[in-house]
């Protein structure tokens, strides 16, 4: 997968993508990630990317021109048609299902908003969708883009070592994850659940499913209706 990120702070991504799992994915050629400086697509000597809002009001608005030119530059570089995402608090909420959907794209362009807003013509005529990572306002889309790239990249085959660990974890079946334990079996008087040490895989599977349901019911009941419906449908399909 190729990801191009358009931002006025492209250096924010230097460390984020060069260490850890994403760094490995880049080394293995499973991913190419490029951060482009929006100011390189301006055409005045001050490299202006923003201007005052029409109609008045506080703050500055990111101009449409540099963003359109940056995307056109990316488009000209390569044949594969990109899926273009604008990161903003006005977007649809990012979740694991959206991460899965984006992981199937060959090429993504992520546009990071800044300041008080972005010229609406960017959202209306340049991008395929607008995504928010949560109901809070960040100072810009850069951290949101990093979150999206991280969640998406680990779903690309080969990026995470054992593909089962991605399939089993939180949200893949719409539930929170079950609790995990490792050695020692007893730590400062707290014992790991005996069932996990029993070697009985059927019991372990059942315990984990029950724990996942309990955690979800307690912490995120909003997830529960769709998760149980989905897994019941899967069980029906498999007969
Ligand atoms: N830019 C500012 N806040 C954001 C958010 N919550 N999600 C995505 N992009 C943003």
Image (spheres, rainbow, N blue to C red):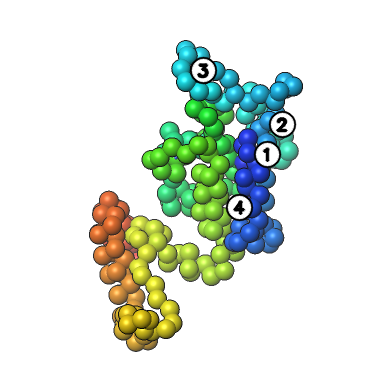
Q: Earlier in the sequence, mark 4 or mark 2?
A: 4
Residue nearest the observer in this picture, 83 or 141: 141
- Label 3, residues with CA under 10 Å away: few <14, some 14-19, many ≥20: some
Extreme residue in the front direction: 188
Q: Earlier in the sequence, mark 3 or mark 4?
A: 4
Q: Residue at x 50, y 37 (%)?
A: 139
Q: Quadrant of residue 82?
A: top right
Residue 75 visible in image: no
Q: Residue at x 37, y 64 (%)?
A: 177
Q: Quadrant of residue 72?
A: top right
Is ligand 1 closer than 8 angstroms to the Cβ of mark 2? no
User: Could you say where residue 76 lies in the image, as x and y percent from the top left?
Assistant: 72, 34
Secondary element type, mark 1: strand
Distance from label 3 to label 2 (Cα)? 22 Å
Left or right: 151 in relation to 203 = right
> What residue would you read off at disc 3?
53
> What residue would you read off at disc 4?
16
> What residue would you read off at disc 2?
40
> What residue would you read off at disc 1?
36
Q: Earlier in the sequence, mark 1 or mark 4?
A: 4
């Amino acid at each position: 997968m190729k990801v191009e990120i358009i931002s006025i702070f492209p250096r924010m991504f230097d460390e984020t993508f060069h260490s850890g799992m994403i760094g490995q994915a880049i080394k293995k050629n499973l991913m190419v990630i490029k951060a482009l400086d929006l100011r390189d697509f301006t055409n005045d000597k001050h490299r202006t990317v923003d201007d005052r809002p029409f109609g008045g009001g506080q703050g500055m608005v990111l101009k449409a021109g540099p963003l359109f030119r940056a995307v056109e530059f990316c488009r000209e570089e390569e044949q594969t048609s990109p899926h273009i995402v604008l990161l903003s608090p006005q977007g649809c909420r990012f979740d694991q299902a959206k991460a899965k959907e984006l992981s199937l794209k060959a090429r993504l362009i992520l546009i990071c908003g800044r300041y008080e807003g972005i010229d609406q013509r960017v959202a209306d005529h340049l991008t395929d969708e607008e995504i928010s990572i949560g109901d809070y306002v960040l100072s810009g889309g850069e951290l949101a883009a990093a979150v999206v790239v991280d969640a998406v990249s680990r779903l690309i085959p080969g990026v995470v070592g054992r593909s089962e660990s991605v399939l089993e974890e939180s949200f893949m079946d719409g539930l929170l994850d079950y609790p995990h334990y490792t050695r020692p079996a007893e730590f400062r008087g707290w014992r790991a659940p005996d069932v996990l040490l029993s070697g009985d895989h059927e019991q372990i599977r059942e315990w984990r499913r029950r724990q996942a349901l309990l955690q979800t019911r307690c912490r995120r009941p909003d997830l529960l209706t769709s998760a149980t419906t989905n897994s019941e449908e899967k069980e029906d399909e498999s007969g």
